[in-house]
Image (cartoon, rainbow, N blue to C red):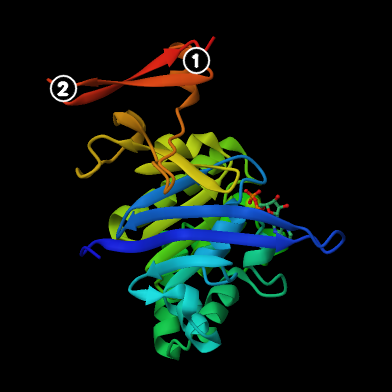
Amino acid sequence: MSNNGFMRLEQVTKNYKDPASDIYFQALRGIDLKIKKGTLSSIIGPSGAGKSTLLNIMGGMTKPSTGTIIIDELAVHSLDESGLNYYRRNVAGFLWQLPERNLLPHLTARENILYSMEVAGTAREERETRVKELMTSVGLGARMDHKLGQLSGGEAQRCSLAVALANNPKLLLADEPTGELDSETTIEIISYLQELNREQGTTIIVVTHDQRFERMTGQSYNILDGTIAGLRRSIDRDKEIKDWRSSQREEISVVNQFGQVKIPNRIRKKYKITEYVRFVEDLESKRVYLEPVDHE
Ligand SMILES: Nc1ncnc2c1ncn2[C@@H]1O[C@H](COP(=O)(O)OP(=O)(O)O)[C@@H](O)[C@H]1O
Ligand SMILES: [Mg+2]
């Protein structure tokens, strides 16, 4: 793997068995994905597309049915229970949609953050210093001693972010982190993620159905029916970008192991590509063109 190749997924599948009928359902149908270190990516798709399944597999919470998952040089797909524990405590951090899943309700914001460091085995003195830093960086300084029930949705999610970051994870995985938030608070959380990515170099992956993430992240993958069909990314993604919204984007498609390509809907509509296409080679320019064909 190249130096900045941080994560590599090859042909990852996940089958679930329906207990009633005993029939297998393929939630992931061969995911290939490479994510570079220090990038901010989103994986966007509708409900049922396989987003949570994929994220849980990346986080070492769920075993894939088949496939290879290399993250930070660890073969996550073949780690045993103690390897997985190490990975979940020291490499990956999680941010879930529901604050109830991130925070213990009987503990204050501060205690929640301290608790997650304690679980990871951080020394006491370090915990005290780090908790202050974290509370300040997510802008919760004044709400330190409030419990989950006393925090607004946005505050609870910022506190959850602090909990997820307590162990300095190299990788932050977020599942619909703004699903329960209003527009303004959503933008606020996205801004925190961008800042974290820029300033600490944390590799961040957000899965969501929220299309707004597309322009807020360096690259956004499109997941549909358990496969990654394509991605949109900033053309000048190697430059340091302060505002992704104003960056120029390109849309590219994945060629899967069978040689199949998904033609983006926009292109299909615009050029009236319906059932068949012909590949027209232009030898001079070494380009291949797609041409709609009327089969009849
Ligand atoms: N534990 C499970 N058992 C059986 N089916 C599941 C399980 N988890 C998810 N699924 C099914 O797999 C598909 C993908 O689910 P999920 O990954 O949660 O999608 P998303 O997060 O994109 O909504 C859905 O059809 C869902 O019903
Ligand atoms: Mg989900």
User: Amino acid under label 1?
Assistant: Lys
Residue located beneath label 2 in the image:
283
Above or below — where is 261 with respect to 64? above
Task: Give the SS element for disc 1.
Answer: helix
Whichever of labels 1 and 2 marks the residue nearer the N terminus, that label is 1
Q: Is residue 128 left or right of residue 100?
A: left
> Which residue is at a point 40% across and 79% down the rendered structure image?
129
Number of numbered tags placed on the structure image:
2
Specify the farthest residue to the right.
Answer: 20
Task: State whether label 2 is within 8 Å of ligand 1.
Answer: no
Task: Give the SS element for disc 2.
Answer: loop
Dot 1 alpha-carbon crowd within 10 angstroms: few under 14, some 14 to 19, many 20 or more: few
**Quadrant in which the C terminus appears:** top right
Which is more toward the observer, 266 or 268?
A: 268
Above or below — where is 294 with respect to 218? above
Which is more toward the observer, 188 or 81?
A: 81
| Cα separation between marks 1 and 2 | 27 Å
**Quadrant in which the N terminus appears:** bottom left
Dot 2 alpha-carbon crowd within 10 angstroms: few under 14, some 14 to 19, many 20 or more: few
> Which residue is at a point 29% across and 57% down the rendered structure image?
199
In the picture, residue 19 is in which quadrant?
bottom right
Which is more toward the observer, 165 or 5?
A: 5
Residue located beneath label 1 in the image:
269
Residue 117, x across and y down, in percent: 49, 81
Task: State whether label 1 is within 8 Å of ligand 1.
Answer: no
